[in-house]
Amino acid sequence: MSYSGLTVLYDGSCPLCSREIAYYQKLQAREPLLFIDVSNSLQALPDGINRCDALKRFHLVGPNDQVWQGARAFLRLWRALPGWRFLGYLGAIPPLPWLMEAVYRLILPIRPKLARLFSKASKV
């Protein structure tokens, strides 16, 4: 699978992830974006990306098959999005990527609980 833009791999079974991605999809990105829901087992994934790993962490794949994960993936994606570019560049200044990754890793284990809370709150 080859794509000339950025490929955004997200967990479509996660209400938090889906809502965030839906927001990003509405923005006019400064480079082409392809969104792939990795929870859909029928969706082909970029070469070298394991579905199980992609479901555990946010991934972004560049046109030269460069892969970003976690906080660095968000920072790279934000640089392509209007209104987010500043944070994408600011967040790349050391030690911010490390701090953002630390927070991201803290949130990962509680993501299912946050998703359930979000799901209940959105039904009210």
Image (cartoon, rainbow, N blue to C red):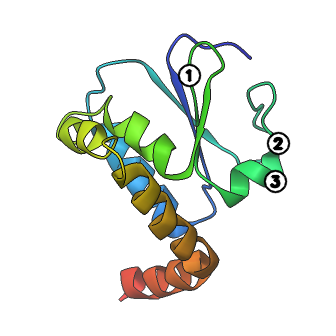
Q: CA distance from mark 2 to mark 3?
A: 6 Å
Q: Earlier in the sequence, mark 3 or mark 1?
A: 3
Horizontal arrangement in the rendering, residue 21 relative to residue 105 (left or right)? left
Marks counted in the figure total 3
Could you tell me which secondary element the residue under label 1 belongs to? loop
Disc 1 target residue: 62
Horizontal arrangement in the rendering, residue 92 relative to residue 2 (left or right)? left
Q: Is residue 11 above or below residue 24?
A: below
Residue 39 visible in the shown view: no
Q: CA distance from mark 3 to mark 1?
A: 20 Å
Q: Is residue 4 above or below residue 23?
A: above
Residue 66, how many percent across, how many down?
A: 62, 23
Horizontal arrangement in the rendering, residue 7 relative to residue 53 (left or right)? left
For badge 1, the amino acid type reads Gly
Q: CA distance from mark 1 to mark 2?
A: 16 Å
| Front one among 99 and 65 | 99
Query: Residue 19 is drawn in which quadrant?
Result: bottom left
For badge 2, the amino acid type reads Asn
| Front one among 70 and 117 | 70
Disc 3 target residue: 52
Could you tell me which secondary element the residue under label 3 belongs to? helix
For badge 3, the amino acid type reads Cys
Residue at 60% of width from left, 14% of height from top? Answer: 3
Could you tell me which secondary element the residue under label 2 belongs to? loop
Disc 2 target residue: 50
- Label 2 crowding class (10 Å Cα cut-off): few <14, some 14-19, many 20+? few
